[in-house]
Every structure is written in C-alpha cells, then in structure tokens.
C-alpha cells in the first residue's frame, strides 16, 4: 500500500463521519508487516466537546425509547455481527496482529456481550415488596445515567468496546468511544454496523485520539461515567481524575497472571493450556499466563514438555494458515520485550527458550518467539512487571502453600489458575488466592459476558466491574418508590 492510498480515519459524531478539528495524526501499522494501514486523528478537546454535546442531546430522546425497542436494535446488530464474523476478524488481525482464529474468538466474545445486553427487558426489571407495612408498598425502578465515555486498549479492539457500549446503550445511555489509537479501525466498522442495525444518530459516537481525548472525557461535566480498560498507570490516573470530577468510574487495569501446577496434575493438559495462555495473542492479553509456580519435583518434566510444545508453535502473519503466534503491537514494544529478556538474564533467571532466536524474530514485522525463563524469583523485575509479551516465568516451589504465598505477593490480581485433580487443593486455592478470576485445569479463565470481569488489587479500580450484573448496575441508577394507597 502506498502512502497516498492510506486514508485518515474520521470521527463518528451524531451519525456523521466528521474530520477531526485537530490536524494531528498518528500512523496505524499492520504489526505483521510494518506497513502503514491508516492514519488516526489525534483529536482535540473541541472534538470531544462536540461528541459529548451530541451524545447529551441524543440522550434526551434515547432514554425515552422503550427498553424492548432498544433491545430489538441489539438483536439486529447481533445478526449483522454474525454475518460479518470473518470480515471483522480480518480487520482485527490486520490491525492487532493476533491470529485469525484468535480474532474469530474475539468476535465471538463481542457477540456474546451483545446477546447478554439484548436481555435488557429482563435485566432492567425492578424489585418490589407489596407490603412493607400495613397499606404500604415499595418498589425499585432502573434508569440510565447519561453520557458514558469508553476508553479502550489496543489488545481487544472488538471485545473490550463490546464490554461497554451494548449494555450502556441498551439501558438507555448514550456513548462516546475513544478507541486505542493503535487499533482504531474496527471501531469505525462497528459504528457502520450499528447504523445498519437502526441505532438512532448520536447514541453511539467515536472520537479518535490519545490522552487529550481521555482528559476531555474525564473533565467534561456532561459525562456521567467512564469505563476504562488499559494499563495500570493509566487506569490509576483515569480512576483518580474521573472520581475527582465526581464521575462513576470503572478502570480495568494491568495484570500478571499466575498458574500453579501441582505434582498430581495432568501435565499434558497443563502444558497445552499454559503454552496457549502464555503465547496466544503474543502474550498481549490481560489474562495471559505470565508466571507458573510449579512443584519442584515435577519442574524438569514440566519444563521439557512446555518447551517441546512451544517449539511446535507456528509464528508469523496471523492471516496465514496455522499461524498461532503473531507479532507484538509495535516495534517499540518489541524493543521493550527484548529488553526484558536481557533484564531476566541479568537478574540470574535461566533462559530455557529464547524467542530472539526464532527465525520469525529476525524478519520484518514485530515478532518475538515464545520465551521461557526458569529459576525466577519474586525479587526479579521479570516476575514483578507486566511485560505484555510472549515471555513466561517459572518459579519452582516446594508445595501448594508456598505457591499461593508466592502468587499473593503480586500487586496484580486479575486471573490465577491451578492444575491439579486434588479437590482439597482446589478449595484451598479458591479460598486463599488473591485474584478475581480463577481457573481449574484451564489456562485462561476469562469469564463470559454474563459474569463480571472481576480483577482485584492493582488489576482493577472501582466498585462495579465490567459485564454481568455489575455492568448493568454500573450503567444504571435506581429509584425506590414507597406508596400508601389507603
Ligand atoms: P494503555 O494504558 O496504553 O492505553 C489504554 C487507553 O488509554 C488507550 O485508549 C490510550 O489512548 C489511553 N492512554 C494511554 N496513555 C494515556 C495517558 N497517559 N493519559 C490518558 N490516556 C492514555 O493500554 P494498552 O497498551 O493499549 O493496552 C494494554 C494494557 O491493557 C495492558 O496493561 C493490559 O493488561 C490492559 N488490559 C486490561 C484488561 C482488564 O480486563 N483488566 C483487559 C485488556 C487490557
């Protein structure tokens, strides 16, 4: 693609494609080839104000639309997404780099969110008690809260926005999305498809850009709530600035997910699951397996098997057949990843598989092969930091107690998994581990749309998580009416 053919994306405000007022843009790359595939506007505060104003005006009418009618638009949208499944997955692979199969899985996750939100007529029902006292009754009614600002990361350009806008709009709110400037293409396609589904103008809007747009949303008095998903420092910043401005904020943050492998585990299953969880999407998942605490007496056998399976993974452009491991998102993220491999070596961890040596890592595109460190300790940066890349650290432990103690030292607490057939061990793990999303004998315990995505500690700031009943509660407020008829 030549530079002249590369288009500059537009913002989507009030159902129109509008050029950003700011003339600043950034390049969007296909990380598998390094090719520039679009320019994304780095919009200004003026663009944000325009988007929020339109969304605030649209809210006045949209909140009055009966819930079943709003849900019907989502039913139609769901069918459109199903029909366009592969087209959407291809956009995801091109802008993010993950394999086409993973991208198809991401589209599925997005569709599931739309399906869950389409149940709004049941979900929004209130409670009532006909006799709170003699002749007195009470009941609750649920209402939208206004304009919602959604700020999303690069790693799930479809699923993460879909954690937010379907539930937000079906409950009667209007929405301004600020997609990741590194993967902004899919969002624009979603806007076109929402329009095709019959969504009225102004209910869903997109303002592309970076921190100026985020700050604009955080400071705007007409934005009632902020849903954020991204890295820890930004999540903390967004949560503090948003709540300081008296907004409702949910900020899903970074992670460092731990797996525990006990000596009775089915090692074939454990290694298959962990290889997939550590290296799928090039480790760029908030639920990626990044540390394994393994009982010392099975550690050698476990690592041999892990290495063998990692060696079998096909690395390359996610659109090519059978590719499992695509590139990381940018050249500077590749440099960051390589610097962590050097750090791990410098800290004294044992490099048992070096992703720098894979053939693909020397090609164009931002590839790093599966990398495995053994003999990692909790003092090392490679254990502490979220690297967000295909690097797996192994900590040798003497038993379950020490595995849990090691895991609980992490400041992050998104997901944690255990591999064992011992029910007592599973119970102990469940009761004592610090993490919000647990898995037993599976690699990635990412909950489905009807359960909350429930990180703990520095993996989440706020009260109500994304998805499930938490998502419904986050985007609504209640009235309680108490009535005497006699
Ligand atoms: P990021 O924090 O760099 O960006 C997220 C969003 O914040 C983007 O829209 C970006 O434009 C904006 N942003 C970035 N820097 C900003 C700043 N200084 N001020 C204001 N806004 C800013 O995250 P990313 O690299 O796009 O995504 C990867 C991160 O997201 C990882 O840390 C991953 O764990 C996390 N993540 C978490 C979850 C979860 O459920 N907890 C899910 C997906 C991703």
Image (spheres, helix red, strand yellow):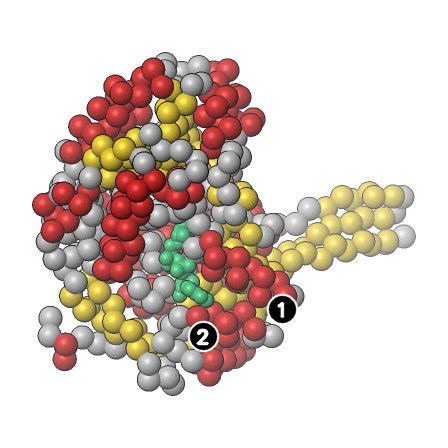
How many numbered marks have been drawn onto this rendered protein structure? 2
Residue occupied by mark 1: 245
Label 1 secondary element: loop
| For residue 372, side relative to residue 148 (left or right) | left
**Quadrant showing the N terminus:** bottom left
In whole angstroms, how far apart are the C-alphas of marks 2 and 1? 16 Å
Q: Which mark is residue 212?
A: 2
Q: Residues within 10 Å of mark 1 (few under 14, many from 20)?
A: some
Mark 1 vs ligand 1: CB under 8 Å? no
Camera-side residue of 435 and 320: 435
434, above or below 369, in the image: above
Q: Position of residue 286 (x, y in %)?
A: 39, 46
> Is the residue marked by circle 2 packed among few (<14), some (14-19), or many (20+) residues within 10 Å?
some
| Residue 124: % across, % down | 59, 52
Decide if residue 476 is on the left or right side of residue 48.
Answer: right
Image quarter where ligand 1 lies? bottom left
Position of 26 relative to 372 (above/below):
below
Q: Who's the residue at 46% across and 77% down the image? A: 48
Identify which residue, 299 or 140, lies in the foreground.
Answer: 299
Residue drawn at the location 38% of the way across and 85% of the way down = 21
């Amino acid at each position: 693609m030549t530079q002249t053919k590369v288009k500059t994306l537009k913002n989507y405000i009030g159902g129109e494609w509008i050029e950003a007022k700011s003339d600043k843009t950034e390049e969007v790359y296909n990380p598998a080839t390094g090719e520039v595939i679009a320019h994304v506007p780095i919009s200004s505060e003026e663009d944000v104000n325009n988007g929020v104003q339109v969304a605030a005006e649209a809210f006045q009418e949209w909140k009055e639309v009966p819930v079943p009618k709003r849900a019907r638009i989502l039913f139609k949208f769901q069918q459109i997404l199903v029909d366009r499944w592969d087209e959407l997955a291809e956009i995801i692979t091109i802008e993010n780099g993950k394999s086409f199969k993973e991208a198809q899985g991401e589209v599925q996750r997005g569709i599931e969110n739309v399906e869950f939100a389409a149940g709004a007529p049941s979900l929004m029902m209130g409670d009532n008690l006909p006799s709170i006292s003699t002749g007195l009754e009470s009941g609750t009614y649920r209402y939208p809260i206004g304009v919602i600002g959604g700020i999303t990361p690069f790693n799930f350009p479809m699923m993460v926005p879909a954690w937010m806008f379907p539930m937000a709009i079906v409950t009667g709110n209007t929405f301004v999305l600020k997609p990741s400037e590194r993967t902004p293409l899919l969002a624009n396609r979603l806007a076109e498809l929402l329009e095709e589904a019959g969504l009225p103008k102004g209910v869903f809007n997109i303002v592309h850009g970076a921190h100026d747009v985020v700050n604009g949303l955080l400071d705007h008095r007409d934005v009632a709530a902020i849903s954020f998903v991204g890295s820890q420092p930004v999540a903390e910043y967004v949560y503090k600035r948003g709540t300081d401005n008296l907004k409702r904020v949910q900020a899903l943050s970074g992670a460092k997910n731990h797996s525990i492998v006990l000596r009775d585990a089915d090692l074939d299953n454990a290694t298959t699951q962990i290889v997939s969880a550590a290296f799928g999407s090039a480790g760029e998942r908030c639920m990626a397996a990044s540390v394994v605490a393994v009982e010392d007496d099975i550690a050698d056998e476990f690592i041999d098997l892990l290495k063998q399976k990692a060696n079998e993974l096909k690395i390359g452009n996610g659109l090519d057949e059978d590719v499992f491991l695509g590139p990381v998102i940018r050249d500077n993220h590749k440099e960051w990843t390589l610097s962590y491999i050097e750090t791990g070596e410098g800290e004294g961890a044992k490099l048992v598989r070096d992703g720098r040596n894979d053939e693909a890592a020397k090609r164009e595109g931002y590839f790093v092969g599966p990398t495995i460190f053994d003999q990692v300790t909790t003092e090392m940066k490679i254990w502490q930091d979220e690297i967000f890349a295909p690097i797996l650290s192994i900590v040798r432990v003497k038993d379950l107690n020490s595995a849990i103690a090691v895991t609980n030292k992490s400041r992050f607490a998104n997901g944690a998994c255990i591999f064992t057939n011992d029910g007592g061990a599973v119970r102990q793990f469940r009761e004592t581990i610090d993490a919000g999303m647990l898995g037993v004998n599976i690699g990635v315990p990412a909950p489905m749309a009807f359960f909350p995505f429930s990180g703990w500690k520095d993996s989440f700031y706020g009260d109500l998580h994304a998805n499930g009943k938490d998502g419904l509660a986050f985007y609504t407020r209640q009235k309680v009416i108490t009535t005497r008829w006699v």
